[in-house]
Amino acid sequence: AAAAVDDGETTARFEAEVRSWLAWCRALPKVELHAHLNGSARSSTLVELASGLGEKGLINFPEVQAILLKGDRSLAECFKLFDLIHLLTTDHNIITRITKEVIEDFAAENVIYLELRTTPKCNASVGMTKRSYVEAVLAGLKAVEAVQVISGSQENHKKVLGTTLSRPIIYVQLLLSIDRRESTEAAIDTVQLALDMRNCGVVGIDLSGNPWVGDWNTFVPALKLAREKGLRITLHCGEVPNPTEVQNMLLFQPERIGHACCLEESEWTSLLHSSIPVEVCLTSNMRTETVPVLQDHHFASLYKSKHPIVICTDDPGIFATDITREYALAAVCFGLKKANLQFLAQNAVRHIFADDKVQAELQKIFDAAAINPH
Ligand code: 6MZ
């Protein structure tokens, strides 16, 4: 159901076309800027965790397995699914494991810079605080074996880059998410935590969660504090129609926004004038039906207007996609050529939440890897 399809044959043709792009898109170095940790967890790992809880009689395993493996889901169903996933991933060790696996999965798609976002959670029953949650995520970064993770302070970068590397590298930075269900105080706690953990690789704040829940004004004090202290900010914006909120978000001038699916004409004009980069998540928007048909996705008009866009996955685990497929979808749906995809991938470096030195390192990797666009 990835495209506007009218019959099985059209779907098969579309999928064959997407497949023909995969190898090339995989080889292209890529930057991922919008991926939620728990939404990126491997389905196989979640099913394994659910099976464990099922054996203990804590959940009905067949029912949970069916929900985890279901293909299409509405936006509302998505948030129910997140609550379920969070039940499976309540432990520090599990958070560490899924972080490690998620980074390895992105690296396997040739992602060289990843900004992973996650909502710090408290859970008294397992002695989890927001801080210990983020520490468990950081332990996941350290546990990665398949590739060399570069994260944290410049000093750390120098240490890693100063040695002879036997493995490919991936830069990983963290964004802490404020969930729209949270209070002003809870949101401020998350920002404080991000500030405390700046040297460990936390670079910014995201506002996400069920877009039908919560009010923009609740989060403004936390976001202002983040901005004052120099953290970068990205907001889920216009995932559902909410003109007042979209206007306020654009006036706030975040460094990036995610989605921008449901903007009215005047908001659209403001966005285009603002030059705020948009993190575009094609499959996610299709699956949650925030965009009716992939071929009509606002990617096309943003691209035509030369507005900065970054192709991202959102939740590759729950939407059964990966960043390679998202690039291939863009090629097939919007008639992009290899050189266009190469430009999009490399240009994304300009919108990362890292300093000029990291940007320059990444540009070098892109230049060295420049793959044949013909
Ligand atoms: C809004 C989303 C989202 O933080 O537990 N999240 N928020 N829109 C979306 N589009 C589908 N996808 C994910 O990862 C899961 C959390 O990320 C946010 C939700 O708050 C979800 O609970 P973490 O690692």
Image: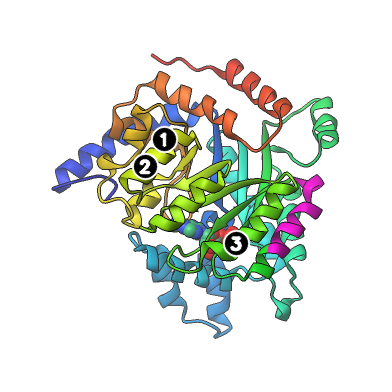
In the image, residue 173 lies at what x, y percent?
68, 43
Residue nearest the observer in this picture, 263 or 5: 263
User: Closest to the observer: 62 or 363?
Assistant: 363
Above/below status of 13 relative to 69? above
How far separated are the C-alphas under marks 3 and 2? Answer: 23 Å
Answer whether residue 279 is visible to the viewer in this image: yes
Up the image or down, 158 lies above or below 217; here it is above
Amino acid type, mark 1: Leu
| Residue 325 visible from this viewpoint | no
Q: Which residues are magenta?
A: 188-201
- Picture coordinates of residue 164, whole percent (x, y): 80, 25
Residue topped by disc 2: 268
Q: Residue at x 43, y 26 (%)?
A: 341
Identify the disc placed on residue 219. 3
Local crowd size for mark 3, using a 10 Å CA cut-off: few (<14), some (14–19), many (≥20): many
Q: In this figure, which residue is indicated by the disc labeled 1?
A: 272
Verify whether residue 196 appears in magenta.
Answer: yes
Question: Tag 1, which secondary structure?
Answer: helix
Task: Establish if 117 lies above or below 76.
Answer: above
Could you tell me what secondary structure mostly forms the magenta stretch?
helix
- Circles 2 and 1: CB atoms closer than 8 Å: yes
